[in-house]
Image: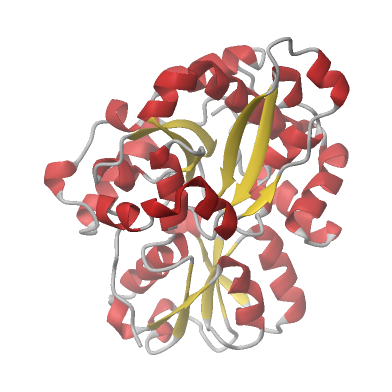
Amino acid sequence: MTLTPMPITPRLCRSVAMLGAAGIAGLAVAFAASPAAAQAQNCPQGLRKINVGVAVAPPNVVHTAPFVAKALGFFAKRCVDANIIQFDGGAAGTSVTAVGQGTAISNLPDVAIAQGLKARQIWGLAPRPPQAFVVTAEIKTAADLKGKRLSAAGGVGGFNWLMGREVLRKAGLAVADAQFVSQGTAGRLPGFVAGQIDGVVLHPEDVYLVQKQKPGAHVMSTIADLLPSLAFNHYGAADSLIAKDRPLLVDTVAAMIEANRAIYRDRDKVVPIIVEATGKPRDAVEFAIDSITQACVLSVNQGFVRERTEWTHQNTVDNGDLDAARKLTFDRIVDMSIADDAVKAAGGPVTIGACKD
């Protein structure tokens, strides 16, 4: 059965809005370890609580800045008590709803804002996509995907579905020419290894593992080569949360900027944290960190590249996922001031190797 597009819309968000914070907590995995008491004593006004969403359950290496920030005390030193919540896909209705309700910050697609969600992107976790589209041994070209089973992990309109659609288009094929299999994000790797799907978008750590576990599996294209201008992952917050708790958002983002910088600079220190968060073997995590940092996937500053945001937004219009009348300017999508202030709070702009975004 071939699935059809279902872009994120306000109606979709409203359909799960009744879940509220309690419902979201029931659908996500929460990490609520308390900051150290010594840190709490340095916060005369007490610890400020915030829910920080992660786009995938369990997280991929690229998503682990909140875990690193928590483990290394970057949140606590800013008097932030961050509760980490995992969502099953960054475009998942529960994730977008949580942002819209002001109950969490999480990955926020530009199309959700254009569709009417009263929110802005506030920081770019990863301006560039780290993944690759991986296929089975018998598939040599994109044309060979006709009639094959492709992953729609995270649902229709999610990242896997969108990238599968792009790969098909490179061969002049349509969505209806393949069978998209809906699955949880955690099912991507085991589903591919078990032969349930023939093509899937995988993060670097899973590319490493699949090439050890499934003979002949190979990378057809990296997403960065497929869509060189794609803006990948940006945190967003509700307009109401920005108005109410802007200093808290600045401090939360500053902590995650420090975490990203630590992933570049302190590999040995962050590896055990990321292994625990992802549940992936150490060698796979180390491979992914090297791949991600060499390609400047993770941001070290604001994480926004205007040209990427504008290209990605126009691409949603060109693909028919967004009515042209709803197209937004960069400043309507992004609240750059929060990222700017967070960079200042993290010690100012830095360049690490060739990475400066």
Q: Would you place residue 196 above or below residue 306 in this image?
A: below
Q: Residue at x 71, y 32 (%)?
A: 259
Q: Quadrant of the N terminus?
A: bottom left
Judge left or right: residue 133 versus residue 79: left
Q: Nearer the viewer, residue 172 or 25?
A: 25
Identity of the residue furthest to the left in this view:
325
Q: Residue at x 51, y 31 (%)?
A: 303
Q: Residue at x 14, y 47 (%)?
A: 324
Q: Quadrant of the C terminus?
A: top right
The answer to whether residue 91 is seen in the rendering is no
Where residue 239 appears, as percent x and y from the top left, is: 36, 28
Question: What coloring was used for the rendering?
Answer: secondary structure
Q: Nearer the viewer, residue 159 or 29?
A: 29
Judge left or right: residue 89 versus residue 167: right
Q: Would you place residue 253 above or below residue 19 in this image?
A: above
Identity of the residue furthest to the top in this view:
44
Where residue 71 appears, as percent x and y from the top left, is: 80, 36
The answer to whether residue 116 is seen in the rendering is yes
Q: Nearer the viewer, residue 342 or 319?
A: 342
Q: Residue at x 33, y 78 (%)?
A: 3
Where residue 299 appears, as percent x and y from the top left, is: 58, 33
